[in-house]
Amino acid sequence: MIFDVKILGCNSASFAFGRHHTSQLVNQNQNLFLIDCGEGTQLQLIRHQIRPGRINHIFISHLHGDHYLGLMGLIFTFHLQGRTEPLSIFGPQGLDEIITVQLRHSESVLNYVIHFHVLSKGGEVIFENEDIWVKTVLMNHRIPCFGFIFEEKLRKFKLLREKLPSTLSRENLAELKEGQDIVDNEGNFIPNADLAVPPAIPRKYAYLADTRYLEHDLPEVFGANLLYHEATFLSDMKSRAESTFHSTAAEAALFAARHQVKTLLIGHYSSRYFDLQPFLAEARPHFSETVLAVEGQLYDIKHNQLLESSENHAPSRANR
Ligand SMILES: [Zn+2]
Ligand SMILES: [Zn+2]
């Protein structure tokens, strides 16, 4: 089942060196979830041949411009394209007001409905479908800021249809799907493993938006197959990182190591840096499985390891 992340923007406050403001697209089983929508996100969607109309859920981490100033344009584009599907937007308090004011002053009536969900606390399940749920975590930033955890649900055991005897009842089939051994209508004991295979281990993508280094643990992040953590600065700017409520590459790596994630993806680079290799050099001594967020690249979230999609280069080689 598809579960990947495409980086649409990886820079922080300023556009620089061809790097755009923050935006990512999560694809889980062909459902597209947009995380943050900095200025330029629409153009990035076009550049990467993603139809905006396929996006039904947008998650905005906080109200600094580099994370949401592209949203209004996208909302109008949906309208101009004749969208009728409802759009769900998850964001901090105030975002609904910003959207409403702009619609009111342009005397615009959208031909689709926006369902707005105000984020208020961490550890909350804000969305779920049959495959995944999305939870919030709290960042430590200058204004209210949220991270999002995309976690697959545990699926049922898969029946080996060609091996199923005719003596099984409907209850037996349900028990097999739950991973239980069964006793059939004729009293035969049948181990589950004879007739079913266990589901894959659920995968988890943790997106942590702008934050100062978190000294405390976030239980929701533990064991994530992929963790995105901001790394705005290198350690020589540590005091600046602290005063602006951002993190360094080393801090992102320390956080990843503490949370035993499989792979760390860093981004939200300051526009002062042209060369991103020093970010890897600083992070990897603390957490070797660190890769750079590079725009246009697709990061597949594989079971217990990160594999790059065939259309791109490996993340670790992306910036050579
Ligand atoms: Zn930012
Ligand atoms: Zn910010």
Image (spheres, helix red, strand yellow):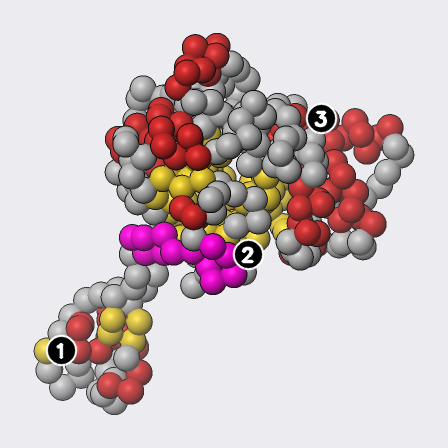
Distance from Cα at disc 2 to Cα at disc 1: 38 Å
Label 3 crowd bin: few (<14), some (14–19), many (20+), radius 10 Å: few
Question: How far from the left and from the top, in percent, is residue 7?
Answer: 54, 45
* Secondary structure found at label 3: helix
Number of numbered tags placed on the structure image: 3
Point out which mark residue 31 bears. Answer: 2
In magenta, the rendered stretch is 302-313
Viewer-proximal residue among 289 and 52: 289
Distance from Cα at disc 3 to Cα at disc 2: 27 Å
Viewer-proximal residue among 278 and 34: 278
Task: Name the residue: 29% across, 64% down.
Answer: 199
Residue 41 visible in the shown view: yes
Question: How far from the left and from the top, in percent, is residue 129?
Answer: 48, 53
Distance from Cα at disc 3 to Cα at disc 1: 59 Å
Task: Name the residue: 32% across, 35% down.
Answer: 284
Residue under pointer 3: 97
Task: Name the residue: 29% across, 87% down.
Answer: 162
Position above or below: 169 against 153: below
| Residue 305 belongs to the span the image colors magenta | yes
Viewer-proximal residue among 152 and 298: 298
Disc on the earlier residue, 3 or 1:
3
Q: Quadrant of residue 234?
A: top left
Instruction: From the image, state whether disc 3 or disc 1 is nearer to you.
Output: 3
From the viewer's perspective, is 263 left or right of 76?
left
From the viewer's perspective, is 164 left or right of 64?
left
Task: Name the residue: 28% across, 79% down.
Answer: 160
Mark 2 and mark 3 in contact (Cβ < 8 Å)? no
Residue under pointer 1: 190
Instruction: From the image, state whether disc 3 or disc 2 is nearer to you.
Output: 2
- Name the amino acid type tagged 3: Glu
- Name the amino acid type tagged 1: Ile
